[in-house]
Image: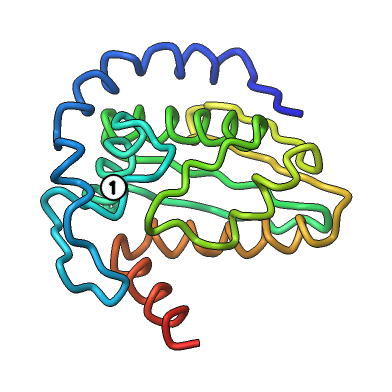
């Protein structure tokens, strides 16, 4: 179940022009070309690892905006016994619009069980797309930022929510470097 509170819905509806502007940043061909798990072929300009098997160009562009501007992000996480409560914000209005759109869009994808299969995506997300009915999500956009509360009665989903919150916090703090290190650790196993 997803509950988007009215202010969040308004913020999501207002991001359309931002998404339209962002979707022209990189062609599909350029985004899919040459990104290896070991960092070879990495291109910070087109960020090809942000493309996915079922991701739209707009979704990939949102991720690029967030990764390119991660220094503007701040994040707080409360670990709950049955999930998480996060507050994420950006000091840049355009980045904030991309953040709100990304949160709403990915939450809707989880509810529909539609995995975008982003090339750099953490395997932690697999359980969310496999068990969307096990997650209750509330999203609210406030002056403090995007507030997301996700809970579950499924202990494996709760563990994944805790893990993913940490992964997102690491990406918000360190950008693509956090992703590269996670991918290198996974390749070493």
Q: Is residue 42 left or right of residue 144?
A: left
Using the image as rendered, state which of residue 80 and residue 162 is in the foreground.
162
Rendered location of residue 88, percent (x, y): 48, 44
At 32% from the left and 71% from the top, the residue drawn is 37
Find residue 157 and report its image quarter. bottom right
Find residue 163 and report its image quarter. bottom right
- Model colouring: rainbow
Q: Is residue 143 left or right of residue 67?
A: right
Q: Is residue 113 left or right of residue 60?
A: right
Q: Looking at the image, is 152 positioned above or below residue 57?
A: below
Using the image as rendered, state which of residue 109 and residue 93 is in the foreground.
109
Find residue 155 and report its image quarter. bottom right
At 55% from the left and 42% from the top, the residue drawn is 115
Quadrant into which the N terminus falls: top right
Rendered location of residue 43, percent (x, y): 13, 59
Rendered location of residue 5, percent (x, y): 64, 19
At 70% from the left and 58% from the top, the residue drawn is 79
Q: Residue furthest bottom?
A: 188
Q: Looking at the image, is 48 positioned above or below residue 36?
A: above
Rendered location of residue 156, percent (x, y): 79, 61
Report the number of numbered marks. Answer: 1
Q: Looking at the image, is 58 positioned above or below residue 11?
A: below
**Residue identified by numbered label 1:** 72
The local secondary structure at tag 1 comes to helix
At 26% from the left and 29% from the top, the residue drawn is 94
Within 10 angstroms of label 1, few (less than 14), some, or many (20 or more) residues?
A: some
């Amino acid at each position: 179940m997803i509950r988007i509170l009215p202010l969040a819905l308004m913020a999501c509806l207002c991001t359309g022009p931002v998404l339209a502007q962002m979707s022209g940043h990189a062609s599909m061909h350029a985004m899919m070309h040459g990104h290896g798990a070991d960092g070879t072929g990495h291109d910070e300009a087109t960020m090809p690892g942000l493309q996915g098997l079922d991701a739209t160009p707009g979704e990939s562009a949102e991720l690029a905006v967030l990764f390119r501007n991660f220094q503007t992000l701040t994040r707080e996480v409360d670990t709950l016994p049955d999930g998480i409560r996060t507050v994420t914000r950006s000091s840049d209005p355009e980045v904030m619009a991309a953040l709100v759109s990304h949160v709403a869009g990915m939450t809707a994808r989880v509810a529909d069980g539609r995995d975008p299969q982003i090339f750099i995506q953490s395997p932690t997300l697999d359980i969310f797309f496999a068990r969307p009915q096990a997650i209750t999500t509330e999203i609210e956009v406030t002056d403090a930022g995007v507030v997301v509360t996700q809970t579950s009665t499924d202990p494996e989903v709760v563990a994944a929510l805790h893990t993913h919150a940490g992964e997102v916090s690491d990406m918000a703090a360190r950008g693509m470097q956090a992703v590269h290190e996670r991918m290198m650790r996974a390749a070493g196993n």
